[in-house]
Amino acid sequence: MELPIWLNETSPSMCRCGCGGRRKGNFIEKTLHDIVNFLREAVLSEEIAMRQGFLQHMDPRVKVMSLFYLLVVINLGSNLALLWTFYFVLLGVAFLSHLPVRQVISRVWLVIPLFTGIMVLPSIFNWVRPGESLWMIWNFGHSFSLGPITLPSTLAVTKQGIAGAILLVSRVGISVSLAAVLTLSTRWMEMLRALHSFLVPRIFIVTMEMTYRYIFVLVKAMEEIFIARKARDAGQSSLKEQRRFVATTMGGLFGKSLQMSEEVYNAMTARGYTGEIRILHQSRLGWQDILILMFVILAGLIMFAAEKVLGG
């Protein structure tokens, strides 16, 4: 899953005076490295799902049912202490399942606060969510009227707005962490098989299956194109040549993908593919899975009861 040594070597482009210049084909090297990293992460995810851990031994149907149930519980909760207690318990389960806990934390909490925070940013101001003022930003001296809406004369950050923003970011982050933990511990084909058990339309499952497999086909084709480009690039390409190469690559990859899709489909149908997902190991629901599912349901009910007692 790594680039050949000769592709990682830097060969300076030669200017007219014959002196050494900059590294050649930086955009090609970056693209190749991104492709390799994508394939490495995909293979690593499959290896993690096949490890001997707590979640890996669970039936995929139980994990899918627990995922949707716990997502509802989390997004109906309003007590931050309960939500974060659940999150740390989730990290403990991930550790017992031999999942990369540090990777799960970094991937979620380096992205979620940024994008979710941008969406909830207006809600911290009194113009959107009135409440107790924490920080006065500006006093205009008079109110504003926008049709039927009347805005106050001051712009301030409110206590209720900050609390609501923290609650929303926490819900989103914990929900994404839950989905990441359960998907890392489950192979993609097993996940699709579990969805089939919950009467998800067959066309949806087949589309997801083909999309997942075809992503790797296109990535492999793109890798071959960029490796061939670098092997023929004798010097530093100009920006105009780089843009022309990107444009022609997009068109060529589109045409190649259409041709390859026909070939792949014909090969699959020739080998007896009828749209039904088939895996070698059929999962069976055991008494351990039933006990775990009952425990998850009980934990959700306890969280609901604690919400009523403690409040938001």
Image (tube, rainbow, N blue to C red):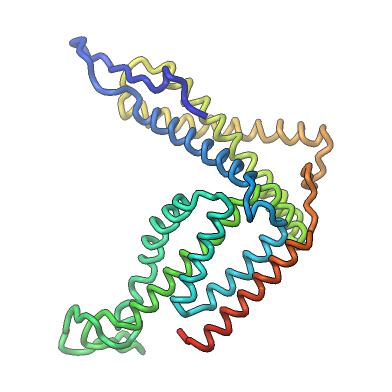
Residue visible at 50% across and 49% down? 100
225 lies above or below 37: above
Residue visible at 47% across and 36% down? 37
Residue 288 location (% of width, % of height): 74, 61
Given residues 232 and 57, the one toward you in this image is 57
Residue occupying the far top of the picture: 18
Residue visible at 54% across and 83% down? 306
Residue occupying the far right of the picture: 272
Quarter of the rendering containing residue 118: bottom left
Quarter of the rendering containing residue 23: top left
Given residues 291 and 282, the one toward you in this image is 291
Residue 286 location (% of width, % of height): 78, 59
Badge count? 0
Residue 97 location (% of width, % of height): 59, 53
Q: Is residue 203 left or right of residue 142?
A: right
Quarter of the rendering containing residue 16: top left
Q: Is residue 36 left or right of residue 195?
A: left
Given residues 237 and 155, the one toward you in this image is 155
Q: Quadrant of the C terminus?
A: bottom left
172 lies above or below 247: below
Residue 277 location (% of width, % of height): 77, 47
